[in-house]
Image (tube, rainbow, N blue to C red):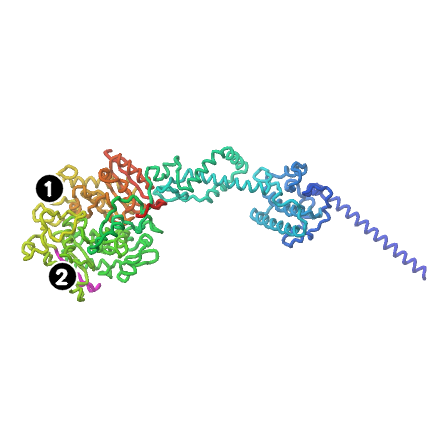
Amino acid sequence: MKRSTTAGSCYSSTTTTTIIFISLSALFLWLFTTSNNSSPTNINNISSISRSDGNDDQPSATTIATHDLHLEPEQILPVDPVKSTDHDDQQPTHDNIIQVNQNDDDPNDASSSSSSNNISEDDTSSTTQVQVEQEEEKVTLNNNEPQAKESLEEEEKQAALETQTSEESTVTHKQEIQQTKQDINNHFHDDDHATTSSSSETTTTISHNNYHEIITDEDGQQRLEEHQKQEDDQFQQIQQKWHPKNDPTGATSHDQIQHDEQEPITLHHEQIINHDDDDQASSKDDQTKNKKKSSTQADDESTVSSEKERRNNGGGSNKDEEDKSSSSEDYGYKWQMCNTSAGADYIPCLDNEKVISQIHTRKHHEHRERHCPEDPPTCLVPLPNGYKRRIDWPQSRDKIWYHNVPHTLLAEVKGHQNWVKVVGEFLTFPGGGTQFIHGALHYIDFIQEAVPDIAWGKHSRVVLDVGCGVASLGGYLFERDVLTMSFAPKDEHEAQVQFALERGIPAISAVMGSQRLPFPSRVFDVVHCARCRVPWHADGGALLLELNRVLRPGGYFVWSATPVYQKLEEDVQIWREMSNLTVAMCWELITIKKDKLNSVGVAIYRKPDSNDCYEQRKRNSPPMCKLADDPNAAWYVPLQSCMHKTPVGENERGSQWPEEWPERIETPPYWLNNSEMGIHGKPSPDDFTSDYQHWKKVVQKSYMDGLGINWSNVRNVMDMKAVYGGFAAALKEMKVWVMNVVNIDSPDTLPIIYERGLFGIYHDWCESFSTYPRTYDLLHADHLFSGLKKRCKVVTVVAEVDRIVRPGGKLIVRDDSKTIGEIDKMLKSLQWKVSMNLSENEQHVVLTAHKSQTWRPDSYAPPS
């Protein structure tokens, strides 16, 4: 039994040994076969990777394990198990492998060179992705740790197959790898495993737009600086091409140029850089540009230095671009901003603080009257913050941009009376006033119902509104074909006249003080005063007598004030004094009427049209004026407490009422004498007619279409040298109004202008005009400047033109060629856009100029 047991055990042991041997042999054979199937390419590529210290005795790469790097799971690049077994179809080749070298390796190393030279020029995207994959491997080698050949082989295969990754994903992935590298380096630095080479010393072979370039981080920084300098040079070159000339202060705003109607075009540095990016120029082209830039760097450096110095110091200009946008200094002028407390509302003759501070009495509002500087200013008035192109008529009658006239005092004080209200970004005008809260049109019709002979727009055409407020009465009288000259002082009732002009309603800044109003005698058909607290009865009735001077014989004075309908003690006393004065002046009280809707009353007086009452007065008080006193003399003439006799002769102005409107505009006044020569050398009536025909022809054939003016945007117009008012008469069918200016050194034709149903003012253009800045859309000057040169500096008049014309406004100048040449230079120095044409008979030149929408100089004049 024992033997038998022993034999069984031996058999069993022998059998087991045989099975084990066979299994081991099979396992060995399988391992041998698997090893022979590995690609030799991988081994060759692996062998080309060396340590930074060049030690050939480094440990075998097969001994390293990735877990020794202590990487977080997301930091280890995964190995695709499918790709790792596809040895036949997915083998990495020299076309998609990036060779990684350390900086101590020989740059002429054969394996390195061979790998680099075989990078595919068509696989830029693949190359970039593989570079990202290999940089992780490079980090491992830089830290002197062994790595398994199989692991590296699989990662190389994976890198070769990651060819479909998007550019954005590649960039993001690269940033993650760089962060991983930093984390690994920090880890091994702490464990004293860091190598002597740093990331700034690493070189990488890359493929970029069909050429190879080895870049160190140090070289990359240098190239970045060169690229930035190249961009700066390109930016400066564009500046030199499009840069505006210096502004009048010598400072240049490099981000704006003037174009067309001086609309600013902004050039941003980023836009220029993007433009270069959009070109997608090849790197070879970039290299060529860099070589050219280097070859001319010595010349460019002086140019760039000069450009930077000019920008920093605010001086200099590009002479090659004089036809684009030139500085004031290029034309011999240096403009500066006005440095006054009035700021954007500066009126030189009304804001002369030096003179006003020396006035000892203000009893007659002397401080509100004109006090012009001895030397007219040549500074420019700033724009209000947020200024916009004005709203067109008729919408402007009801609302304007708040930032164009940013004053709210009247809205706060008079808002409940419907003067003006703030509504969002607008100031609105409900059409009311102190005496007509429920609307100006109702009030206008109420007046005509009270006195039908007023006949708005036919018998009564030209009205003077005293103490106009925001001029709503004048704004709505346009609907009745009536022109209204509104005026109010520049006083604590903030910006009344400025509101009116911004709305498109005629107005001037003036006060009834110690001097006559700048109008001829006997020209207004109606004078109106609503709730005006003017002491008419004071000083012998001097102020009411001034209204008597400018009121046409037979004309009406409409007085709408509390003394007419209230019974307070003060009001009763004023009414008593007013009644005595008007009786002494021979004014007839036509009616006292109560407006029940507005709960106000109005007293309407009529001026006599003969001398009968004057001759029958028992007392000569107020006295009649002396014969030597010219009733038309009004420029800086003190008030006279007297009355002028009414003209009664058949050919005397004022003895008859003009033709009804609109016939009066083209009918020669009855008092023009055929025996007297007119301005143009013909008998006066014929001179009047030919002048009208001339301007109708000029306006229709030239101004309407030939000057590039959009007349639908024009509302406030001024004829700076009006003569008979022919230019204004030629515009009568348009929705505009014209301020006709008759110069004090010219023949007095202003009464003719009023006679034909237009209005105007006396003025001396050697002084500032009594209006706010930015109040006219168009100025017209016919042979004005050539005459002014004999009396004052034309540059001061041009500065005044710039002050009163709105941004984007227009100027038409007709004059001799020499004068036009001077005006042209001045306007261009102000950044106006100028064009010129010969007149039809070539005897003079017509200049048309458009004011810049935004340009203002950067520096300020000394305080004034």
Q: Amino acid at mark 1?
A: Asn
Residue 744 located left or right of residue 626: right
Q: CA distance from mark 2 to mark 1?
A: 43 Å
User: Residue 372 or 131: which is nearer the viewer?
Assistant: 372
Residue 615 located left or right of residue 694: left
Give the residue at mark 2.
Answer: 577
Q: Tell me residue 852's x, y (percent).
A: 33, 44
Callout count:
2
Q: Tell me residue 324's x, y (percent).
A: 37, 38
Identity of the residue drawn at 31% across and 37% down = 825
Give the residue at mark 1.
Answer: 673
Is residue 423 among what the camera can see? yes
Q: For residue 512: magenta?
A: no
Q: Amino acid at mark 2?
A: Glu
Is residue 757 among what the camera can see? no
Q: Tell me residue 495's x, y (percent).
A: 28, 54
- Circle 1 packing at 10 Å, graded few (<14), some (14-19), many (20+), is some
Which span of residues is magenta-colored? Answer: 591-606
| Most common secondary structure along the magenta stretch | strand
- Circle 2 packing at 10 Å, graded few (<14), some (14-19), many (20+), is some
Residue 238 located left or right of residue 483: right
Q: Secondary structure at mark 1?
A: loop
Residue 155 located left or right of residue 125: right
